[in-house]
Amino acid sequence: EAQVTQNPRYLITVTGKKLTVTCSQNMNHEYMSWYRQDPGLGLRQIYYSMNVEVTDKGDVPEGYKVSRKEKRNFPLILESPSPNQTSLYFCASSPGSGGYYNEQFFGPGTRLTVL
Amino acid sequence: RKEVEQDPGPFNVPEGATVAFNCTYSNSASQSFFWYRQDCRKEPKLLMSVYSSGNEDGRFTAQLNRASQYISLLIRDSKLSDSATYLCVVNIPDDYKLSFGAGTTVTVRA
């Protein structure tokens, strides 16, 4: 089944404890992206990747890191999480390098709470 | 000014009714427009792309008005299963990313 998977789905952590949210897609998509969703603000892009080893900042990259060593994986790293990073996170992938022209397929989301 | 703005609603309509709502975008050079559907904090899923000439998919009709910089979504013969939040999505020119509206909530009641 074609899908985007994220792990963990739910995470409660404490300020400053490094964490990684994994994202994997099995559709051979070139474009991958991370979003956070907060009430009233819609989805905001954190980072995106147009292909392996190519990543770039989105609208709200502060406090996050990403890597794209393999085409299928695009982990999101929070080196020192803070309470303002409490949010619902979505990973998405899209065929082609122009992710803005094509349908984006979203993972199921990761609900993160930072205490 | 936000890049994409939507009326948050909620739009409460009875089954069988027609409901329509708009989304405005700020950049006149935007070229890609989409409506996504999101159920109760689950992942967004593409409902339909919006083409210049307007397009229809069953009970759903999307229109693009470039002059006034808005897109619209119309749902005919509403079903209970249409209850969801509808996200307007527009590309940002010269950037490889999309801008999402905060969503319009539709609730269809029996």
Image (cartoon, grey):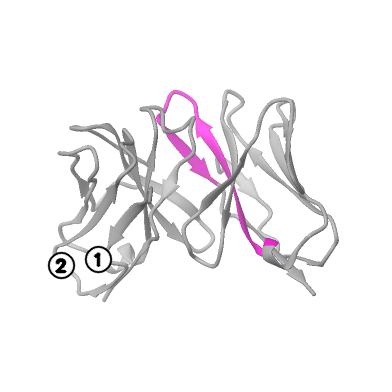
- SS label for mark 2: loop
Task: Give the image quarter of residue A9.
Answer: bottom left
Would you say residue A89 sits in the magenta stretch?
no
Is the same chain shared between marks 1 and 2? yes
Numbered circles on residues, count = 2
Q: Amino acid at mark 2?
A: Gly
Q: Are marks 1 and 2 in contact (CB under 8 Å)?
A: yes
Residue ranking furthest to the front: A1
The residue identified by callout 2 is A16
Q: Work out whether mark 1 precedes mark 2 in sequence or the reverse, and give the earlier one.
A: 2
- Where does the image place residue B10, in percent across and percent down from the top left? 70, 65
Task: Tell me how far mark 1 sits from mark 2, CA to CA.
Answer: 7 Å
Front position in the image: B85 or A43:
B85
Residue segment shown in magenta: B82-100
Q: Please give the name of the residue rendered at 69% of the width and 32% of the height, measured from the top-left corner.
A: B69
Q: Predominant secondary structure in magenta? A: strand
The residue identified by callout 1 is A82
Left or right: where does residue B53 sit relative to residue B44?
Answer: right
Q: Chain of mark 2?
A: A
What number is the disc on residue B37?
A: none
- Where does the image place residue A60, in percent across and percent down from the top left? 35, 47
Q: Please give the name of the residue rendered at 19% of the width and 71% of the height, measured from the top-left corner.
A: A15
Left or right: where does residue A48 sit relative to residue B32?
Answer: left
Q: Please give the name of the residue rendered at 22% of the width and 50% of the height, measured from the top-left corner.
A: A75
Q: Chain of mark 1?
A: A
Front position in the image: B38 or A5:
A5
Left or right: where does residue B41 sit relative to residue B16?
Answer: left
- Where does the image place residue B3, in percent across and percent down from the top left? 55, 39
Compared to residue B48, the image places residue A22 above or below, namely below
Q: Please give the name of the residue rendered at 46% of the width and 58% of the height, measured from the top-left corner.
A: B43
Compared to residue B79, the image places residue B63 above or below, namely above
